[in-house]
Amino acid sequence: MKRLEYQKGKLTLYALLLIVAAGAMVLARNCSSPTWHVDDNRAGGDTINVAIEISPLGISTRNDTLSGYYYDMIRMLAQQHNRPLKIDGFTHLSSVLDHLEEGRYDVVIGDIAANSNLRERFLATVPVLIDRQVLVQSRDTVTGELRYPSQFSLTGDTIHVPYNSPFKTRLEHLTRELGDTIYIVEDNELGAEQMIIMVARHQLPNAVVNSHLAEIMKQDYPWLDSSVEISFNQFQSWLVNKRDSVLCDTLNAWITTFHDTPAAQQLDHTYLD
């Protein structure tokens, strides 16, 4: 899978590329069919306003077209039920959750384990994926050894996570479980995929991300290791504005039915196998 390499200071360029690519897709489709595009304004009517995390699992580019597990899945669901979509990409969960709460978006899709804190603010769909949180680190270039061979080796050290992500909550729980201190640094500029790239380039010592994303990125950076698990398996859900229980029920029905189809199996094979 082709992946986008993000660098600091280049997010604006990538946003423009997303707009151009998505706009071309819109023009190529019949006007009466559902459309998918990137825009800063909320669409009205029966259009579902969706924000998807920019990553190989969420939305990225492959063979000069937009792709991603979540991107493909929501498009398939919308096509099946004849609902138009308006899709934006995001890298920082905290800001997009504020937009969801304000009503700019109807649904936020990404590597999100809907913990109790998130469920207080939003509605969560039925599980879309099962994933777990892992520590990504580079093996020593000479010995192949790991700086962090287990969870216990994290104590007294500094671990990096995206800003305001659920990973921080899990690390705080792990600190109490281990009975020692883990120093947590939240990066307010980098998303999970970008942090993995920084680890691969030895610009960060570590990062906590979801396992599926780590496995995809290891195809391009085989010296990375993700063997140290930070959490048990967790259900990944999509988040919906708390005032829109009807949409959440609709998505639940769509997702539940979709899981038993050949299209879902093909999607798993393309992105997860």
Image (cartoon, rainbow, N blue to C red):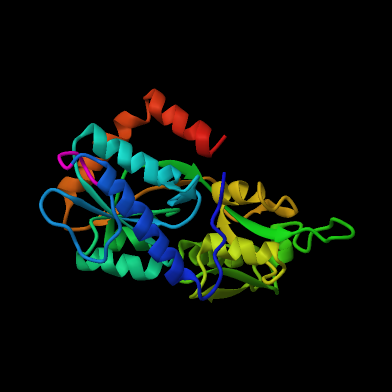
Question: For the point 56% across and 48% down, which residue is it?
Answer: 2
The segment highlighted magenta reads 31-35
Q: In the rendered image, which quarter is residue 105 located in?
A: bottom left
Q: Is residue 254 magenta?
A: no
How far from the left and from the top, in percent, is residue 229?
63, 52
In the displayed structure, 86 sits above or below 160; it is above
Question: For the point 84% across and 57% down, which residue is it?
Answer: 145
Q: Nearer the viewer, residue 114 or 49?
A: 49
In the displayed structure, 161 sits above or below 240; it is below
Residue 63 visible in image: yes
How far from the left and from the top, in percent, is residue 54?
44, 57
Q: Nearer the viewer, residue 107 or 85?
A: 85
Question: For the point 32% across and 47% down, which residue is it?
Answer: 25
Q: Is residue 32 magenta?
A: yes
Location of the N terminus (image quadrant): top right
Task: Work out which residue is located at the far right of the displayed protein and give it.
Answer: 143
How far from the left and from the top, in percent, is residue 51?
32, 57
- Look at the magenta stretch and give its main secondary structure: loop
Q: Nearer the viewer, residue 217 or 239?
A: 217
Residue 164 visible in image: no
Question: For the point 20% across and 34% down, which residue is it?
Answer: 81
Q: Nearer the viewer, residue 26 or 5?
A: 26
Q: In the rendered image, which quarter is residue 198 located in?
A: bottom right
Location of the C terminus (image quadrant): top right
How far from the left and from the top, in percent, is residue 216?
59, 47
